[in-house]
Image (cartoon, rainbow, N blue to C red):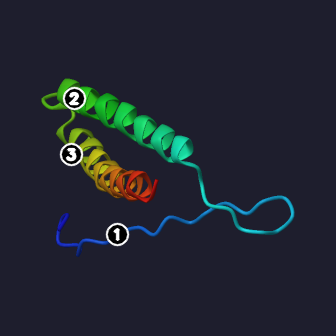
């Protein structure tokens, strides 16, 4: 639970192809998305540490954004594990 909001798992919404059909993202695409999430989580946490004393409100906001990205990263990691189990 984050700040009094119930935990919510985000359903992966596959992109629509040009022909209108729905296609599932590949394992490589989901893995890339997870790496991007982790990169920005690290950036946000580093910036939050820099701002902790000078601008505590912004530091708290950055921490909240990092927490949301972290929750989504967990979902992506679960999706990756499920896809690897299917192979």
Where is mark 1, residue-wise?
A: 9
Give percent across and percent down for residue 85.
Answer: 38, 56
Q: Quadrant of residue 19?
A: bottom right
Q: Is residue 14 above or below residue 53?
A: below
- Look at the numbered disc 1 and give the secondary structure of its residue: loop
Where is mark 3, residue-wise?
A: 60
Q: Is residue 54 above or below residue 38?
A: above
Q: Which tag, 1 or 3, sits closer to the chain's start?
A: 1
Distance from disc 1 to disc 3, alpha carbons, whole Å, reads 23 Å
Residue extending farthest to the front is 87
Where the N terminus falls, by quadrant?
bottom left
Give percent across and percent down for residue 49.
Answer: 18, 28
- Look at the numbered disc 2 and give the secondary structure of its residue: helix
Residue extending farthest to the bottom is 6
- Crowding at label 1, few (<14), some or many (≥20) Cα neighbours within 10 Å? few
Measuring 22% from the left and 29% from the top, which residue is drawn there?
A: 51
Distance from disc 3 to disc 2, alpha carbons, whole Å, reads 9 Å
Decide which of 11, 54 is in the foreground and name it: 11
Where is mark 2, residue-wise?
A: 51
């Amino acid at each position: 639970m984050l700040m009094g909001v119930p935990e919510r798992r985000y359903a992966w919404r596959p992109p629509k192809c040009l022909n209108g059909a729905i296609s599932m993202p590949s394992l490589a695409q989901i893995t890339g998305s997870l790496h991007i999430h982790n990169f920005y989580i690290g950036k946000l946490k580093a910036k939050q540490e820099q701002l902790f004393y000078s601008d505590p409100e912004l530091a708290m906001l950055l921490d909240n954004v990092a927490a949301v990205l972290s929750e989504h990263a967990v979902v992506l990691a679960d999706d990756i594990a499920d896809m690897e189990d299917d192979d």
